[in-house]
Amino acid sequence: MFFKKQKYIKNMVVMLVLMFALGFSINVHAEEPVDNNDYSNEVVPGFEKMARWSYTDSTYAALTLDTSGKATGNCEVNGYQNVTTKIIVYTYLQRVDGNEWVNVSSASHTANSWHAAYQDSFGTQSWGHDYRTRNSIYVYSGNSYENIVFYSNVHHYHSVGDTSNCIN
């Protein structure tokens, strides 16, 4: 009887050691933080896959639509001081027609600097559509440049219950 009890205790110890070892090994892996300025390691819908930006440090785009439908787009681009020499910004106001984004208005600006920030008014827009801005920027260092395309947030300019034009 003593040997059976010893064998039972030994089996229980082995099982506990295995449970702890397996339990700790499962939780060892953790995800690395995502660098939103580096698309070389991930595919982001709506963004080109590219290496880390050579002349561009950061980008920002936003779209506001007030209750009367007046659309205002904001675009800001920061290059690197002593590297970036010029920034050209093309901003397109887009809306969903059917299943396609179509351009309804546009604006462009040029900054002979490492920094550019612009706000554009696109007038009053039609009720019943989703809107966003598509920003295509050319960031120069001397005669070399890189082109980056990025989008603003999407505005659902229709009633809460109307999701016919709403995208995810």
Image: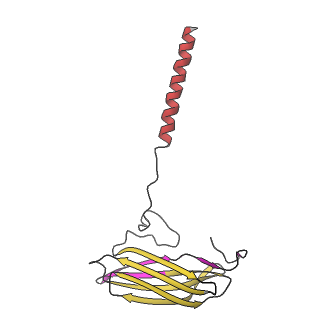
On the image, which quarter does residue 168 sit in? Answer: bottom right
Above or below: residue 94 compared with residue 56:
below
Q: Is residue 159 magenta?
A: yes
Above or below: residue 162 compared with residue 28:
below
Q: How many marks?
A: 0
Q: Residue at x 30, y 84 (%)?
A: 143
**Residue at the extreme top:** 1
Q: Residue at x 44, y 58 (%)?
A: 33
Q: Residue at x 46, y 44 (%)?
A: 28
Please provide percent x and percent y for residue 138. 39, 82
Q: Looking at the figure, which quarter contains the N terminus?
A: top right
Please provide percent x and percent y for residue 10. 51, 19
- Of 72 and 89, nearer the camera is 72
Q: Residue at x 41, y 68 (%)?
A: 37
**Residue at the extreme left:** 82
Q: Is residue 53 magenta?
A: no
On the image, which quarter does residue 76 sit in? Answer: bottom left
Q: Which residue range is magenta in the image?
A: 135-163
- Of 124 and 51, nearer the camera is 124
**Residue at the extreme right:** 161
Along the horizontal axis of the image, is 52 left or right of 64?
left
Above or below: residue 28 compared with residue 98:
above
Please provide percent x and percent y for residue 77. 40, 79
Q: Main secondary structure of the magenta part?
A: strand
